[in-house]
Image (cartoon, grey):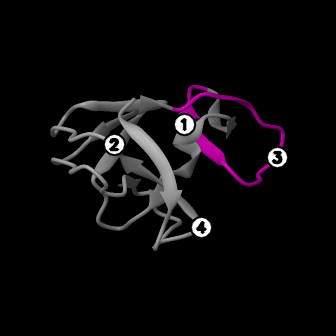
Amino acid sequence: MKTMVQNSSIHGRGLFSSTEIKEGEHIGTFEGIPAKRNNKYILWLEEEKGLIPYRIINEMKYANHSTSPNAELDGLNMFATKRIFIGEEITFHYGSDWS
């Protein structure tokens, strides 16, 4: 396991590295089920049908937003955009609606 959940200085709980993660390395996969409405731990993905909401059910849901992220999504998969050190919080940019 490359990640762990701990208290975050960004917001509530966060996703942290439990091992060093190299740039480009796969961090984890968001596991979810299609959601019927927007709520906590919803990840909106652009698919052929448009934006589809997924309720995330694994620990990846604790990845917080940052305007200077160290990870990015490709579908439901998260990859490091730079080297992430042990104990560093893993963040990604939620999208243009977030500052």
Contact between labelled residues 2 and 1, with CB atoms less than 8 Å apart: no
Give x and y (percent) for residue 68. Answer: 29, 65
**Amino acid under disc 4:** Gly
Spot occupied by residue 14 in the image (x, y as percentages of width and height): 50, 57
Report the side of 62 relative to 70 (left or right).
Answer: right
Of callouts 3 and 2, which one flags the residue occurring earlier in the amino acid sequence? 2
**Amino acid at pointer 1:** Glu
Q: Earlier in the sequence, mark 1 or mark 2?
A: 2
Nearest to the observer: residue 43 or residue 89: 89
Q: Which residue is mark 1?
A: 46
For label 2, count other residues whose C-alpha is less than 10 Å away and answer few (under 14), some (14-19) or many (20+): some
Magenta stretch, residue numbers: 30-48
Tell whether label 1 touches label 3 (CB within 8 Å). Answer: no
Amino acid carrying mark 3 in the image: Arg
Rendering coords of residue 89 (x, y %) = 36, 57
Task: Name the N-terminal-most of marks 2 and 4.
Answer: 4
Q: Secondary structure at mark 1?
A: strand
Circle 2 or circle 4, nearest the eye: 2
Give the Cα separation between the discs numbered 3 and 1: 16 Å
The residue to which callout 4 is attached is 12
Numbered disc in front, either 1 or 4: 4
The residue that label 3 is drawn on is 37
* Between marks 3 and 1 in the image, the one whose residue lies nearer the viewer: 3
